[in-house]
Amino acid sequence: MIREKSARRAKASQTREARPAKGVIASSPPSFRRERALLKRGIWPVAGCDEAGRGPLAGPVVAAAVILDPDRIPKGIDDSKQLTAEEREELFDKICATSSFAVAYASPARIDRDNILRASLWALARAVAALPEAPKHVFVDGRDRLATSCDCEAVIGGDGLVKSIAAASIIAKVTRDRLMRALAEDCPGYGFETHKGYAVPEHLEALDRLGPSVHHRSFFAPVVAAREKHHPSSVPRDLFSLQSETSVVLSDTI
């Protein structure tokens, strides 16, 4: 009887050790598996695209499209949210040096006119169209496919699954962070250089104190409240005008 109890306890202990700890989710970095499968079928170039800046109250949405070189993929590429700022900057340089890429912007004026989703999809399609070589297949992060001249596949959580999308997320994030630091010099006092336009307490306090800047998205609720406080008699903006729209596209290839 004692031996049987000891054997059962030992077996139970082994079972517990074999089980993963509760609350811990094993994850692996994005892979190049989907791109390589298309390459084997003769479908190439293949691009991944992603955007940065859908959630902030200020600044543009920045979209990026990347075609990785299968023979020169930088090590360490991951979803930009899983990387430190220093890691993103380092990988940004490596991706730019070894890949084809393009970046496009949707200005606050376009976001005001079209809404944030449509403006983001527009910028993503612009980035794909600006690539130095036209892709034959596109992977995009999210639920929505893009209006592209080739097949487009939407991948939910793609920045954590597809290496090309992860690379695009890094390009978009670093580009937007640099841009927001530049806007901080143009509009001091809001703290764009630290929070990058997101609705953190520091930003909300500055918005309430200073009122909206020209870089704020007019129809996001905290911006509406700040405008009503500082300019209660202001005339609502014409949603169908793009008075200050800026759309800049950059591309490069090695």
Image (cartoon, grey):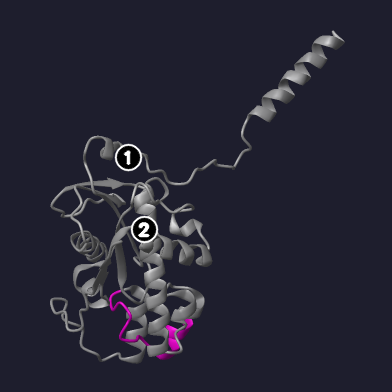
> Which quarter of the figure has residue 104?
bottom left
Residue 98's disc number: 2
**Of the numbered discs in the image, which one, if any, rests on residue 36?**
1
**Residue 91 seen in render:** yes
Give the Cα distance between marks 2 and 1. Answer: 17 Å
In this picture, which residue range is highlighted in magenta?
204-219
Magenta-colored stretch includes residue 213: yes
In the image, taking residue 70 as reference, residue 27 lies left or right, namely right
Q: What residue lies at 27% left-to-right and 76% top-to-bottom?
A: 108
Query: Which residue is found at the position 84% from the left and 10% from the top?
Result: 3
Work out whether 44 lies above or below 219: above
Q: Residue furthest top?
A: 1
Amino acid type at circle 1 is Arg
Question: Which residue shows up at 43% across the image and 46% down it?
Answer: 30
Amino acid carrying label 2: it is Thr
> Residue 98 placed where, x, y %?
36, 58
Residue 246, position as x, y percentages in the image:
22, 78
The secondary structure type at the circle numbered 1 is helix
